[in-house]
Image (cartoon, helix red, strand yellow):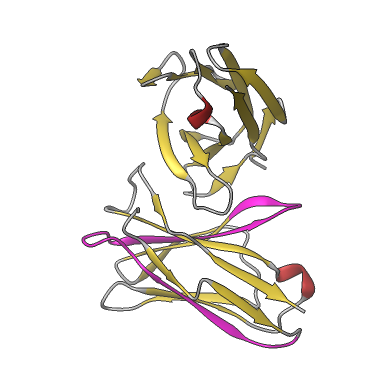
Amino acid sequence: EDQVTQSPEALRLQEGESSSLNCSYTVSGLRGLFWYRQDPGKGPEFLFTLYSAGEEKEKERLKATLTKKESFLHITAPKPEDSATYLCAVQDYGQNFVFGPGTRLSVLP
Amino acid sequence: DSGVTQTPKHLITATGQRVTLRCSPRSGDLSVYWYQQSLDQGLQFLIQYYNGEERAKGNILERFSAQQFPDLHSELNLSSLELGDSALYFCASSVEIRTDTQYFGPGTRLTVL
C-alpha cells in the first residue's frame, strides 16, 4: 500500500530563515511525486512534479528534490506570503494518488 | 482563480440524505478528479474521469458515485450520508488523461448533522 509521511508537522520560520520540508514515501511504482501549496479554506495549488531520483525543480524561492525514498522542498529566504500548508503526493502506475498530511509553514515578519 | 468551478460552496444536510456536488472543469480540460479532505484523514483521492469515462479509482465508498457528462462537467453523488462524510470535497481538472498539472477548484464544504 502506498504511503506518504511529511515532517515536520508544523514549522515556524523568521522571514529570511531558510529551511527544508521532508516527504518520505513508499510506493509500488512511482509515476510521479507532486508538491502542492494550500492556503486555508482553498484548493491546493500545484507547485512541482518530480519523476526520478536525482531530479530537481525550482520556482522562485522553492526548490524540490527527489531521492528513491524521499523528497525535500527547500525554501530559501522565505517571506510571510510563503505561509501555507505544503502537501506532498505520490502517484503510482495504477493512477492512484496518495497525499501526505502536510507541513504547516508559518513565516513571521 | 484556477478556472475550475464547484457548486454549491456550502451544503448542510442530515444523516441518511443524498446530495450532489457539481464541478465544471477549466475550458479545454478533459480530465476531472474528485478528492475528499477531512481533518482526520487529510486529502484523499476518490475518482478520476477522462472525457466521460472512468479512468482511476481511489478510496471511494460504495455509497458515493460520480459521472462526467458530454459537456465535461462532473457530478459527485453522495448517498446515505453519515456524520463522518462531513468534509471539503475538491474537484480538479487537467488537460489530458495523464498530465501532471491539476487545477483545483475552491471546494464544496459538506456538513452532515
Magenta stretch holds residue B43: yes
Left or right of A103 on screen, residue B69: left
**Of all residues shown, which one is farthest toward the left?**
B28
> In front here: B75 or A105?
A105
- Residue B27: image quadrant is bottom left
Whether B87 is drawn above or below B77: the answer is above
- Out of A56 and B11, give the one closest to the viewer: B11
Give percent across and percent down for residue B21: 50, 76
Q: Which residue is painted at 55% across and 17% down in the image?
A: A15
Identify which residue, B56 or B31, lies in the foreground: B31
Q: Is residue B16 left or right of residue A14?
A: right
Viewer-proximal residue, B57 or B73? B73
Height in image: A9 above or below A61? below
Asked if residue B92 lies in the magenta stretch, the reply is no
Tell which residue pokes out farthest to the front in this image: A109
Highlighted range, magenta: B16-44
Quick check: B100 above or below B67? above
Taking the spot 69% from the left edge, 73% from the top edge, the residue there is B111
- The C terminus of chain A sits in image quarter: top right
Residue A47 percent location from the top left of the image = 41, 34
Residue at 54% of width from left, 44% of height from top?
A: A39
Instruction: Name the residue located 67 percent from the left edge and 42 percent from the top edge.
Output: A1
Residue B36 pos. (x, y %): 60, 60
